[in-house]
Amino acid sequence: MVQLYVSAPINANLPKPEKELKAFAKTKELQAGEDETITMTIAAADLASFDESESAWVTDKGDYKFLVASSSKNIKASLNVTIAQPSKIKVNDVLKMKDSLNLLKK
């Protein structure tokens, strides 16, 4: 099993865990010294966090670290990727009440 974790830049407004599992793939049973090429794809939207106050998916600018691992504690390789521009994708705030409720009381 190959796992891909991402460590995001620190954001006090939208805290994230130290690393998040973003993709994984299972290999065939490998013999000693044998290898296999695995491809995993991460979309830019996979790096976003939901900001309730903005009702938007937000991707912070900064340095992201992609960690290839056999487990969360056994990192085999890493790659740094810099996001130069933050992005924000607004969504409809379907849970926000448009009108106040008048509740019946006894």
Image (spheres, helix red, strand yellow):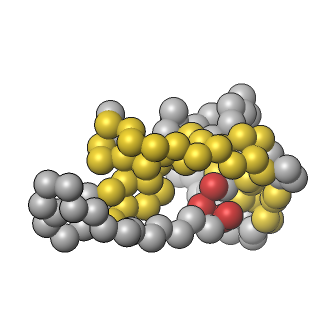
Left or right: residue 105 compared with residue 48:
left
Q: Decide which of 64, 106 is in the foreground and name it.
A: 64
Q: Position of residue 102 (x, y in %)?
A: 69, 59
Residue 52 appears in the figure: no
Left or right: residue 6 compared with residue 11:
left
The quadrant the N terminus occupies is bottom left
Q: Decide which of 74, 106 is in the foreground and name it.
A: 74
Tally of marks: 0
Q: Quadrant of residue 46?
A: bottom right
Residue depicted at 37% across the width and 54% down the height: 3
Q: Check the image and name the residue furthest to the front.
A: 33
Q: Position of residue 95 (x, y in %)?
A: 65, 62
Residue 81 appears in the figure: yes
Left or right: residue 81 compared with residue 66:
right
Residue depicted at 43% across the width and 61% down the height: 23
Residue depicted at 85% across the width and 50% down the height: 84
**Is residue 33 positioned above or below 64 on the image?**
below
Residue depicted at 30% across the width and 67% down the height: 36
**Is residue 43 positioned above or below 78 on the image?**
below
Q: Quadrant of residue 11?
A: top right
Q: Position of residue 83 (x, y in %)?
A: 78, 51
Q: Position of residue 103 (x, y in %)?
A: 62, 57
Q: Decide which of 17, 101 is in the foreground and name it.
A: 17
Left or right: residue 74 compared with residue 20:
left
Q: Quadrant of residue 101?
A: bottom right
